[in-house]
Amino acid sequence: MLDKLISINSLRTTQIESVKTENQKTKTYSFTDKQCSKAQPGQFLMLWIPNKDEIPLSVMNTLGNRVFVTVKNVGDATHKLHQMKKGDIVGVRGPFGNHFTPKKGNILLIGGGTGTAPLLFLAKKLAKRAKHLDFIIGAKTRDELLFVDQSNSLYMKQPIITTEDGTYGLKCLATQPLEQLLAKKGAYKLDMVYACGPEPMIRQVLNLAEVHRFPLEASLERLMRCGIGICGSCMIGKYRVCSDGPVFDGKRLREVKDELGIFKLGFNGNRVSV
Amino acid sequence: MKNDELKTWLGSLELKNPTVLASGILGYTPKSLQRVAESGAGGIVTKSIGLKARMGYPNPTVVQANCGIINAMGLPNPGILEFEKEIRHTKKVITIPLIVSVYGYTVEEYAKVVKVATEAGADAVELNVSCPHVKDTGSEIGQNPELLTQVIRRVKEVTAKPIIVKLSPNVTDIVKIAQVAAKAGADVLTAVNTVRAMAIDAETTLPILSNIRGGLSGPAIKPIALRCVYDIYEKVKTPIIGCGGITTWRDAIEFILAGASAIQIGTAIVQEDPTVFRAVNRGAINYIRKKKYGSIKEIVGQAHLH
């Protein structure tokens, strides 16, 4: 068995070093882990919440040997994690999966909800090299918006903020500013669009990519158990989201379009609506 | 790879090559099974399917060991009535034998699931009587000679398709259980399922798997599995599928020399991807030619001749 796999996949325990409240439902945690601190934007780790569960989380940032993850309180496991404090012990394995391919030129990032987290990590790496860097941040409502301030300080351009209920920024879906941008006469050609968020959003970005022919990479999410490509819990089409993904390019997204935003595998391996 | 040198038989079941996807790996959806088939596998075993849907255990369900992986998935599956559609669909997209793995809590449950699976098109069934981490099924049946006999006999009544029995290494004498299975009518034996194991985290003092106990797979168990195949081949005439830590063509050949007519690959997918099937087959063919043997079939059990 490959030494590298054993090293990455072995469970390490580490202490939570910081907890930051991002909004009513979302917190960012940091801890020291040498392997995960080398993660590239788009990669994920499996976080063990002792006595509770183990969940996949995108890496939101790294700093020296520290790694940051952003977690929304959506269920039992994340609820337990939200009660944990600095000094509490968690387990970690990873980093797993592929990552976004860094591109130069005219870049647009589009994040919905907690999908904004890995894109912020990516934006930090791209900011210096990009010609244009547009960042659309969407959420259902103002209280669920993430990283508006942090993305503000990243580069010259202001992020474009959307909320579905109009409590902040534009009242629309995150895909609408992209549609408007593409419809504009003399709009610059997009060299890459990076997307992460709810699957219907990604599906819509893919539709636009097909019409306007821009390169696209999107990070997908599925129920995950092993994280290393053997259990089959996270299949989309013929791909394993944990190890063939989680980042899919336009070509692969088109291959799985009969499932994307439509259904995924549930805990029984049965099909459930997305 | 079209080549008769690799062709092998499990009773009446013909395989174009001896590499078979082990149960529990990928194995839910037609597209994932199709991908394995296109990667060069000679046969496919699905996830273990029961009469009713099962959620499986909460995570952690997998933990890395030094030379293998310990898992306690808890047999997550959609139940045979749901899976029947996947069997029918899979049969349309693959040409290699589709083997459905089946578990049950009672003799009748095994029979019901086997009936639906074979009527939907399964080319054979593999009875999971060796899962080490779910109560009242799996190894609790495979370790009980009377119950095992009843299950096999009853299942033979509902289908004419080959019945494969997957054996547990977690018994005092695997040969005795293999003899019981063969006598009851098993057409093929798979040796072996995972080795009962666990992992504890020193920092939190907690067992890591949510189910505490799981099954060890991967290179760590290869020598154990190899010995099991060798021992069974000595005493039982039923064809054997070797399983346990097979990662390279050399591992596969060793199992065939020990007495396996085919081999299963599971955990190796984690490091090699499904392309592992093609790599093993290519290596096996080179070996056969280099050693000037006629075919794989010819060297089954060769290690016993010395």
Image: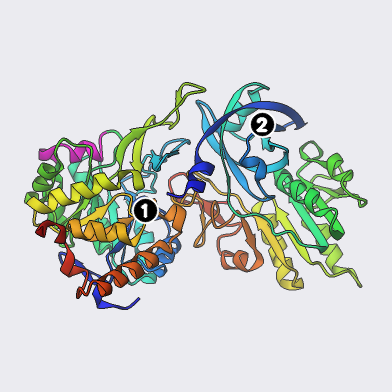
- Residue A10 is situated, as x and y percent measured from the top left of the image, at 50, 38
Q: Is residue B29 magenta?
A: no
Element assignment for label 2: strand
Q: Which residue appears at 59% of the width and 65% of the height?
A: A257
Position in image of residue B41 (x %, y %): 35, 66
Q: Residue at x 19, y 59 (%)?
A: B257
* Viewer-closest of B298 and B22: B298
Which of these two is toward me, B39 or B158?
B39
Disc 1 designates what residue? B266
Badge 2 density bin: few <14, some 14–19, many ≥20, Cα 10 Å: many
Measure the alpha-carbon separation of dots 1 and 2. 33 Å
**Nearest the camera: B27 or B62?**
B62
Q: Is residue A243 above or below residue A149?
A: below
Among the 4 quarters of the image, the one containing residue A17: top right
Whether residue B294 is situated above or below residue A64 in the rendered picture: below
Disc marking residue A31: 2
Is residue B139 highlighted in magenta? Answer: yes
The residue under label 1 is which amino acid type? Gly
Question: Residue type at mark 2?
Answer: Phe
| Image: B202 above or below B294 | above
| A15 with respect to B279 (left or right) | right
